Image (spheres, rainbow, N blue to C red):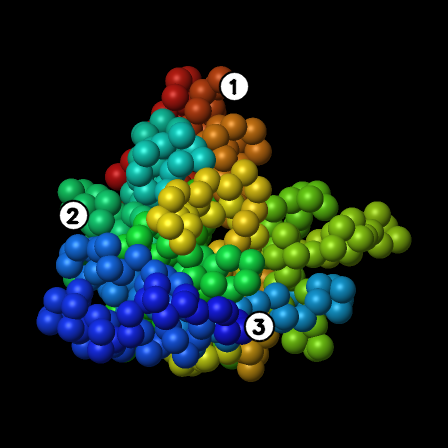
């Protein structure tokens, strides 16, 4: 971010003048420090309206300025988008295809890690339910096709069930965003952490990055507020360090992290088999993959760049590569990213210390106020939001593996109100999976009946087969819970 023109001297008072005239004494030092930082980066335009602000407004503006690292913003602006062209990638070749001959050994290794309390669950839950027509955190959305359980409840109950089976309950770390942090905390408190021991749940908020105009200048949401937005799921590494998550993991002895997204209704967090493959391979970053359903599917693609495993976001892969097919007619870039990872804690801690973590620019319409304080509501993209992706840590792993899983068993995304990746499609996938479990166990499900199985009743098909009553029939919508 190159220097931009500062306001003329008569429009902006230097720190000494402000201290003598407008700024309350309590704000003098903060203003002085902010002024120096802004001046060094050519960003003094955000102080143009200082004289007109009341003390509370001045404090709010300074708090926003203090929440961002201007050096990091400058580096991000200069480097954003310069992280390697998608044209340079080749298809990933080495993939563990499940089921694998090593599955029994892997499952035993993963179960041992769960019994030893080494595994922690990391749930990315910063999204709102706006696109679903729901007012609240996406994790609170009542997705259960029969039970009406929320996504939070579904994910938490799986961890409770794992604790019952293996001993220690995997601790749950929930990353929120500034938009839904308070509401998420309230929900967990109101529902007694959805059955999880309170001391095994930690909620922490990701950080923010400022929005910038086309020249890299900070934008104001109001004369006393910057335009700030959540910094993407790649911000979780720094947030985990800053908010004591890694320290809590060390205290519990958790050195394996199972990462998943709240809007995947079939996410099998803390999966013993997957964890086992991760440990047997001595991997730092392990990924589940799914077969992409079509060239335009909104999932990233696993690939290789410079001999290193990477994930190319669907928004960044050229159409030519996305559509490429091999001699058998299969997609060349066929391995999609469902956002199901396992990391070693040491690897994640190293990411928190990085100063070169990739930042992506998204060209967006950004409402703001102009230099006179008047609102601007653009009809076309007019600036950039900055975000980071956790998947960008993958190329730095000393050892990484990709494990191909069964899409129908592990991926039911919830992205929009209707159509593909909607509540209707996610519920259908959930019911289809559970219908299959029941039928393989000898039960019968009527054609029009919906069936839902909670993890407290059965974590998997094998457990259901051991519990389902002989001659079981579901003639109507049926929920098998605790």
Residue 127 place in picture, x, y as percent: 39, 47
Residue highlighted by disc 1:
447
Q: Disc 2 versus disc 3: distance between alpha carbons?
A: 41 Å
Picture layout, residue 145 above or below residue 108: above
Q: Secondary structure at mark 3?
A: helix
Observer able to see residue 139: yes
Q: Disc 1 versus disc 3: distance between alpha carbons?
A: 55 Å
Q: Nearer the viewer, residue 55 or 285?
A: 55
Picture layout, residue 216 above or below residue 453: below
Q: Is residue 60 left or right of residue 280?
A: left
Q: Secondary structure at mark 2?
A: helix
Reading the chain from its start, which is encountered first: label 2 or label 3?
Answer: 3
Residue 238 place in picture, x, y as percent: 36, 72
Residue highlighted by disc 3:
79
Residue 443 place in picture, x, y as percent: 45, 29
At x 45% / y 80%, what residue is drawn? 354
Q: Residues within 10 Å of mark 3 (few under 14, many from 20)?
A: some
Mark in front: 1 vs 2: 2
Residue 464 place in picture, x, y as percent: 40, 41
At x 40% / y 53%, what residue is drawn? 371
Q: Quadrant of residue 6?
A: bottom left
Reading the chain from its start, which is encountered first: label 1 or label 2?
Answer: 2
Q: Disc 1 versus disc 2: distance between alpha carbons?
A: 39 Å
Residue highlighted by disc 2:
189
Mark in front: 2 vs 3: 3
Q: Nearer the viewer, residue 226 or 158?
A: 226
Q: Nearer the viewer, residue 156 or 132?
A: 132
């Amino acid at each position: 971010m190159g220097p931009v023109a500062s306001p003329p001297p008569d429009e902006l008072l230097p720190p000494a003048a402000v201290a003598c005239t407008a700024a309350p004494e309590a704000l003098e030092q903060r203003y002085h420090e902010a002024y120096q930082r802004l001046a060094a980066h050519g960003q003094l335009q955000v102080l143009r309206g200082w004289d007109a602000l009341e003390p509370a407004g001045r404090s709010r503006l300074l708090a926003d300025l203090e929440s961002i690292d201007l050096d990091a913003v400058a580096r991000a602006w200069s480097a954003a988008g310069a992280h390697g062209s998608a044209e340079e990638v080749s298809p990933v070749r080495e993939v563990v295809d499940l089921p694998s001959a090593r599955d029994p050994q892997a499952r035993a290794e993963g179960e041992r890690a769960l019994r030893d309390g080494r595994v922690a669950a990391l749930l990315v839950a910063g999204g709102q339910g706006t696109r679903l027509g729901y007012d609240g955190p996406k994790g609170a959305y009542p997705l259960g096709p029969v039970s009406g359980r929320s996504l939070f409840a579904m994910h938490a109950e799986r961890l409770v069930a794992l604790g019952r089976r293996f001993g220690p309950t995997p601790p749950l770390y929930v990353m929120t965003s500034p938009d839904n942090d308070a509401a998420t905390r309230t929900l967990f408190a109101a529902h007694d952490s959805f059955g999880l021991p309170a001391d095994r749940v930690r909620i922490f908020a990701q950080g923010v990055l400022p929005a910038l105009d086309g020249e890299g200048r900070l934008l104001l949401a109001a004369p006393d507020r910057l335009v700030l937005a959540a910094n993407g799921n790649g911000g979780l590494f720094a947030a985990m360090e800053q908010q004591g998550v890694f320290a809590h993991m060390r205290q519990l002895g958790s050195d394996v992290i199972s990462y998943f997204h709240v809007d995947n209704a079939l996410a099998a967090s803390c999966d013993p088999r997957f964890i086992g493959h991760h440990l047997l391979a001595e991997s730092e970053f392990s990924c589940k993959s799914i077969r992409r359903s079509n060239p335009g599917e909104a999932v990233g693609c696993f690939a290789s760049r410079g001999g290193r495993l990477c994930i190319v976001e669907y928004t960044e892969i050229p159409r030519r590569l996305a559509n490429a097919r091999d001699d058998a007619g299969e997609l060349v870039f066929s391995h999609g990213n469902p956002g199901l990872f396992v990391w070693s804690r040491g690897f994640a801690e190293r990411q928190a210390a990085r100063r070169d973590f990739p930042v992506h620019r998204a060209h967006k319409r950004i409402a703001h106020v102009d230099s006179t304080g008047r609102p601007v509501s653009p009809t076309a993209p007019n600036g950039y939001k900055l975000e980071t992706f956790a998947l960008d840590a993958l190329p730095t792993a000393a050892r990484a593996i990709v494990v191909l899983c069964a899409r129908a068993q592990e991926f039911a995304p919830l992205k929009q109100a209707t159509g593909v990746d909607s509540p209707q499609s996610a519920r259908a996938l959930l019911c289809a999976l559970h219908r299959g479990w029941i039928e393989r166990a000898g039960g019968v499900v009527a054609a029009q009946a919906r069936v839902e199985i909670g993890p407290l009743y059965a974590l998997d098909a094998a457990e259901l087969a051991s519990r389902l009553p002989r001659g079981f029939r579901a003639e109507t919508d049926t929920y098998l819970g605790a």
